[in-house]
Structures are given as structure tokens and as C-alpha cells.
Image: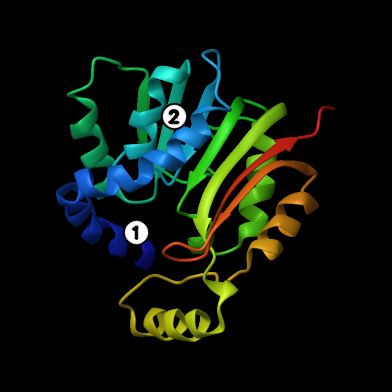
Amino acid sequence: MDKAEKFWDKQSSKFEKQVSKDEQSFIKIIDNAKKHLRETDKVLDLACGIGTSSIQMIDHVKEIQAIDISSGMIEAAIRRMNNLPSKNIEFIHTTLFDDQFKTESYEVITAFNILHLLDDPKIEISRIYDLLKPGGLFISSSAFLGEKSWMRIFFYLLSKTGMIPHLKLLKIEEMERLILSENFKMIEIQKSNNPTPSAFMVAQKFQS
């Protein structure tokens, strides 16, 4: 088990306790994502945590495979799923690079609150591109702590202490350029500064 997995396993119980509060602030993001979903879509939900995004989206798509590197998060998500009438969600403790995920298998891949935590966003986004069908959508929402210099310093120091995981302190434009460099076209960006700089992005894989 690596450091990131250990960190998020410890956080899983806290996430469950705060779920009602967290969901209220998260629903707006998911509502934006729902506008781009179809009932025929097969979705891969990256870094699903305790399953909040998957549970909110499930009635709007055909099927969701939701993954997370934390076994604790996946166990919490499965407990929550057991109370749902819909069973077309599969929660899997794995990574994006698992061989079970085949090229051009998904209409939509979602990544909420994770882009700033990726070790190498370019490699991860390239993998997302490969897994999407032509015309498929990559929907993301993430904090961009690199937008403000004081945040860069503050969160860099916190990550060095081990109090928070490693962060990519990118700016929104940097992430947009990175996504476009992988042969996506950007079809929507919504930026916000409340409470921290963030952006909701929808990018489409070019049709072959």
C-alpha cells in the first residue's frame, strides 16, 4: 500500500460522517455534469471516493464503473450502494491503468476533485483519452491552487509535512493546455473563485 492509499483510507471514515454536508456543495457540480449525460452512456468515475458522484449520476446513465485507490473509500461506497434501488454501479478498488479497462470502452469518464492530486496529469489524461470512445466526454471539476501564489506556498508546505497528500499546484490555463495537447477539444469551462480557485471542464475526444 503506498502513501496516497494509506492517507485516503484514513480519510474514508471522516468522509462518511460528513457526507450530507459534502453532498450539498457537490450537487451543483454533478448537476452540471448531468447536462452532458445520456441514458445509453457507460461511465468510468475516476477517484470516486465514497461514491457520491456515482450515486448522483446513476439514474442518468446506463452503467457506471467507479474506481478508487483507497480500499476504505470503496468499502464505504459499497455500503452506501446497498441502500440504493439502482444496482448498475460497480465499485472497484483499482487504478486507471488496470488492464480490465479496454481501449474505447466508455462514452464518459468523470474526474471530480482529483486532477490536482494526480502524480502525472499528462499520463493520466492520455490514458483517459485512450479509454474513451471517439466523441466521448471527459468531465472534470478540480481545485487549482496554483492560481494564487500564497496558496502555492501554503499547500506546498502542508504537503511536505504529510498533513495533506502531494498536490499539483497548477493554474487553470495549464490544465486546459494539457488536456488540449492530448487531442481533446474543450466544449465547456466554468471557473469559480469561491472558496478556492476551481474549474468545471468538459472536453470531447475528437472523432476518428
- Of residues 174 and 196, the one nearer the viewer is 196
Residue picked out by circle 1: 5
Which is more N-terminal, label 2 or label 1?
Answer: 1
Which residue is disc 2 drawn over? 65
Q: Position of residue 59 (x, y in %)?
A: 39, 18
**Three-letter code for the amino acid on which mark 1 is drawn:** Glu
User: Is the residue 29 above or below the residue 41 in the image?
Assistant: below
Distance (Cα) linking label 1 and label 2: 19 Å
Evaluate whether residue 93 shows in this view: no
* Most distant residue in the right direction: 208
Q: Callout 2: 10 Å neighbours few (<14), some, many (20+)?
A: some
Q: Is residue 128 above or below residue 37?
A: below
Give the quadrant of residue 101.
Answer: top right
For image coordinates 77% across by 41% down, the residue present is 185
For residue 47, side relative to residue 203 (left or right): left
Residue at image coords 29%, 62%: 6
- The residue shown at (30%, 17%) is 87
**Number of the label disc, if any, that sits on residue 92:** none
SS class of the residue under badge 1? helix
Image coords of residue 164 (percent x, y): 35, 73
Q: Position of residue 157 (x, y in %)?
A: 42, 86
Q: Quadrant of the N terminus?
A: bottom left
